[in-house]
Image (cartoon, rainbow, N blue to C red):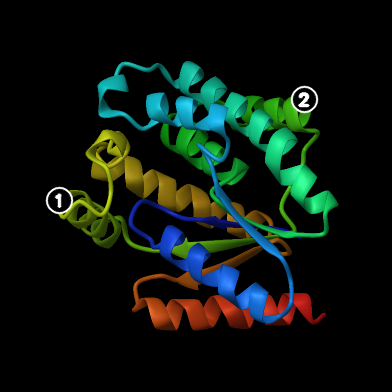
Amino acid sequence: MFITLEGIEGCGKTTQINRLSTFFENRGQSCVVTREPGGTAIGKEIRSILLNPSSKDLVPRAELLLYMADRAQHIAALVKPRLAENKVVLCDRYFDATVVYQGYARGLDTRFIYELHRLVLEDFKPDITILLDLSPHIGLARAWKQLENGARSGTESRFEEETLSFHEKVRAGYLELARLEPERFRTIDASRDEEQVQADIRKVLREFLDK
C-alpha cells in the first residue's frame, strides 16, 4: 500500500509520518518511510539543489523537471520494489505537491504537469493521500521556528522564503485537489496539537484499511 502525506510548510508531515510507522508496525505490517525529494541517494543530490535558497534563480520549468527526475528515480528504485515486497510505503510528499507548487503557485500549466506524470510515471498514484491542512500564517511561523532552533537545516529554506501569497496559492491548490479526488484524499485539520492530529490520521487509516 502506498500512502502519501501532503501539506504546506510547517504542517507537521514529517512528525506525523514518522509516528505512523509505529501504527503500522503495531498492526503487524512492515513499513518504509520515505520522502520527496530526496528518498534515494541520487534524489538527495537533487534535493540539495531544489531546496537550497542559493537556487533562487531556478526557473519554474527547470524546477519541475528536477522534481520529476527525483520522482522517476524514487519510484523505480525504492517505492515499487518495496510495494512488491508487500510493505506499506509512507511518503512525505509526492506528485500532488508538484501540481500545487509548480502548477497552482508557480503558474505552470497543470495539464502539462499531469501529462509529464502520465509519460514518466504511467500515472502511478497513491492508494490514499492525507492532506494536513493549515493556515500559511501558522505553518510558516512553525517552519521558521524550526529553522531558527536548528531542528531543520537552513540550507533547505528556499520555499520558506517565498511570499505569503505563494503559500496561500499552495494551500488553495491542495484543497482543490482534495475536492476533485475525494475518494483518494482525506483532509485533516493540522492546526491542533500533534497528538490530536495523529489520532485523526489513525482513525482515517483504520476506516480505510478495514473497508
User: Can you give x and y, in whole percent of width and height, for residue 54 in the image?
Assistant: 26, 22
Above or below 145: residue 19: below
Quadrant containing the N terminus in the rendered view = bottom right
Q: Nearer the viewer, residue 195 or 21?
A: 21
Question: What residue is rendered at 42% in x and 46% in y?
Answer: 170
Name the residue at 56% across, 75% down.
201
- Residue type of the residue flagged with mark 2: Leu
> In the rendered structure, which disc, 2 or 1, sits on the residue that comes first in sequence?
2
What separation in Å lies between label 2 and label 1 (alpha carbons)? 40 Å
Image position, residue 178 (x, y; %)? 60, 58
Which residue is tagged 2?
Answer: 119
Circle 2 sits in a helix, a strand or a loop, which is it? helix
- 91 or 180: nearer the eye? 91
**Residue at point 44%, 64% (across, down):** 133
Residue labelled with disc 1: 148
Position in image of residue 27 (x %, y %): 71, 80
